[in-house]
Image: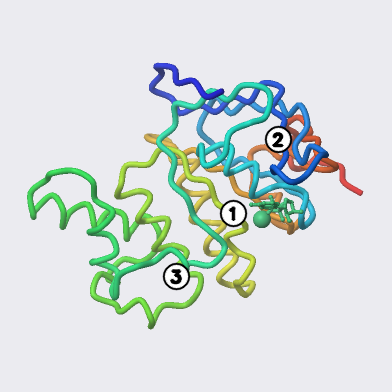
Amino acid sequence: MRNSFENEIPQIHFKDVSFSYPEKKENLIFKCNLSIEKPGFWMVVGKNGTGKSTLLKLMNGIIQPKNGTINCNANIGMVFQNPDHQILMPNCRSELLININQNISDCEINQKIEIVLKQVGLAGFEKRPVHTLSGGQKQRLTIACALISNRNFILLDEPTALLDKTSQLKVLKTIKNLTSDHKKPLSALWITHRYEELIYADAVAELKNGLLSSWQEPSKFQYN
Ligand SMILES: Nc1ncnc2c1ncn2[C@@H]1O[C@H](COP(=O)(O)OP(=O)(O)O)[C@@H](O)[C@H]1O
Ligand SMILES: [Mg+2]
């Protein structure tokens, strides 16, 4: 069951959510409770196959819980592991253009493109062909696409899994900056299996054996 509620702050609430894929008997996600009530950099960590991507599919409504309730009023944007599966157009400007979903003037469009490229550290990249971008630059372009389409909550599914260390840090810092903006902070849920990324988060939860832990401070996060 999926409800919506009126609120300006994007929020996601899971109440006792369980899920299993049709051909599987056991619950992949079991009685999961999760609340994200304010903007920030939220991370969920878990080993491969624990159901992290499934959790995101439940959040954005691609699949429905078997039991429990999901309330979500967020305007969700997605960033996947491989940007080549997501980017459609030949250059940065055209990719951003297909993500603008409002009727606005050319002047406003140009302003918006400039703003979002700057926000992700790609100022001046407007005419750059996508095939000349590094993996990390492509990931930051997909984040810019979410911003230009006015998403207020970005779900990132292992966005650094294919990146080298330098690009990984740039993508992490891009989301850190956006989520800690003092005027209009973004909400981001970052899925990872890399424990070294957790220090960037405002709060961390672990998905393990179908159970999601409560939110913890990254410095106090315990794992085994
Ligand atoms: N569409 C699907 N149908 C059946 N099983 C699936 C489907 N998608 C994922 N699974 C299974 O669910 C488990 C968790 O998958 P996933 O959510 O992708 O985990 P993670 O993202 O943590 O690696 C895996 O065993 C996977 O094979
Ligand atoms: Mg996954």
Q: CA distance from mark 2 to mark 3?
A: 35 Å
Read off the residue under disc 1. Answer: 157
Circle 2 packing at 10 Å, graded few (<14), some (14-19), many (20+), is many
Read off the residue under disc 3. Answer: 137
| Residue 165 pos. (x, y %) | 64, 72
Residue 166 shown left or right of residue 60 in the figure? right
Task: Identify the amino acid type marked 2.
Answer: Phe
In this view of the protein, which residue sits in the foreground, 97 or 9? Answer: 97
* Snapshot quadrant of residue 124: bottom left
- Name the residue located 28 percent from the left edge and 54 percent from the top edge: 99
The furthest residue to the right: 224
- Name the residue located 76 percent from the left edge and 29 percent from the top edge: 214
Residue 75, compared with residue 17, is above or below; it is below
Q: Quadrant of the N terminus?
A: top right
| Residue 32 pos. (x, y %) | 73, 29
Q: Which mark is residue 19?
A: 2
Is the residue under label 1 in contact with that under label 2 (CB below 8 Å)?
no
* Snapshot quadrant of residue 14: top right
Dot 3 falls on a residue whose secondary structure is helix
Residue 49, compared with residue 212, is above or below; it is below
Mark 2 or mark 3: name the one nearer the start of the chain: 2
Circle 1 packing at 10 Å, graded few (<14), some (14-19), many (20+), is many
Q: Nearer the viewer, mark 2 or mark 3?
A: 2
Q: CA distance from mark 1 to mark 3?
A: 16 Å
Task: Identify the amino acid type marked 1.
Answer: Asp
Mark 2 or mark 1: name the one nearer the start of the chain: 2
Dot 2 falls on a residue whose secondary structure is strand
Q: Is mark 1 within 8 Å of ligand 2?
A: yes
The furthest residue to the bottom: 132
Task: Identify the amino acid type marked 3.
Answer: Gln
